Amino acid sequence: MSSTPHDPFYSSPFGPFYRRHTPYMVQPEYRIYEMNKRLQSRTEDSDNLWWDAFATEFFEDDATLTLSFCLEDGPKRYTIGRTLIPRYFSTVFEGGVTDLYYILKHSKESYHNSSITVDCDQCAMVTQHGKPMFTKVCTEGRLILEFTFDDLMRIKTWHFTIRQYRELVPRSILAMHAQDPQVLDQLSKNITRMGLTNFTLNYLRLCVILEPMQELMSRHKTYNLSPRDCLKTCLFQKWQRMVAPPAEPTRQPTTKRRKRKNSTSSTSNSGAGNTANSTGSKKKAPAANLSLSSQVPGLGAIPNCSLNPGRDGDLCHSTAVTPSGQFKEKH
């Protein structure tokens, strides 16, 4: 397979004029081209197994798909998980669509350690409708894709923000019904809302309820429990996670170091140390009090409260500083 200048995916790594600096066999944009071809191979007999295989080929197991658009009643944003993605694509065709493909123009790629991000501000989702009438719908918006940085290069996040859409009716159909006002009035009405069919919109609304129930469905399928037991088990586990204390980070054992004794010390410190060693019951006065009284002039007395009674049985006594710099206890 070789690309031609008329091919919109001319930058394919299979082309003779393209050299890629990454070790991948295909570029991310080409994966969308492969997805379009897979959608074109869909038949009317494609069942749920076919759609599951389609989602497995192009989406990661923890992938999410997000659609953002604005309807008459305000902006909407729907996010569905991997288990609901196959059904989303199938609802597009159940709404009367016969063909679906995506066109990416002027997309930008950014490479990270474990993912590749494709940002396309000019993305078009084109759907061909066979009923209720033959119409081509072009839905334009911004598509942001995140691919895994591996050989499979599957989609991890899909975010399509719809800005506008156009419904195109062939002139030949208008000419055939030019004399029929009722048919012309029917042709003038939109068959989609922001490019999405009613089947797809109803499914997205249903996903708001289905998405939180995925844990219950998975537990029911795995353990074959009743719906009530699944709900009780899930609620109990969530309650355990809420009341459980957060895990404390493991602390590395600190090694104790011996403090080196100072060879020289002041007279006051040695005197205080001798007093503490001799009595053994009185606590040392804070060092900050001693240094504060000696450094700040005009500080006459520093209160010093101790749990040991003084000479007269008081718990608090004070230390006075004499002009000569010596300490004198006052009770």
Image (tube, rainbow, N blue to C red):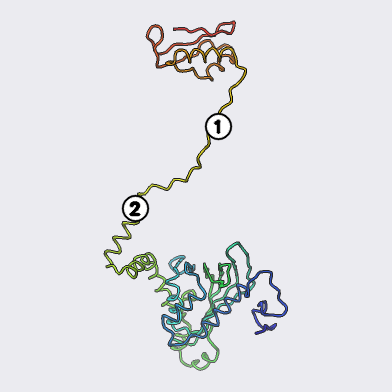
| Residue 93 spot, x, y in % from top left | 45, 82
Dot 2 falls on a residue whose secondary structure is: helix
In the image, residue 98 above or below residue 55 = below
Quadrant where the C terminus sits is top left
How many angstroms separate mark 2 from mark 1 (CA)?
A: 42 Å
Packing grade of label 2 (10 A; few <14, some 14-19, many >=20) is few
Residue 259 horizontal/vertical position (percent)? 56, 27
Instruction: Say which mark, if any, is on residue 240.
Output: 2
- The image quadrant where one finds the N terminus is bottom right
Q: Quadrant of residue 229?
A: bottom left
Q: Tell me if residue 45 comes above or below residue 197 in the rendering.
A: below
Residue found at the far right of this picture? 17
Give the image location of residue 295, x and y in percent. 59, 15
Count of number-bearing discs: 2
Residue kind at label 1, given as amino acid type:
Arg
- Could you say which is closer to the camera, residue 262 or residue 300? 262
Q: Which mark is residue 257?
A: 1
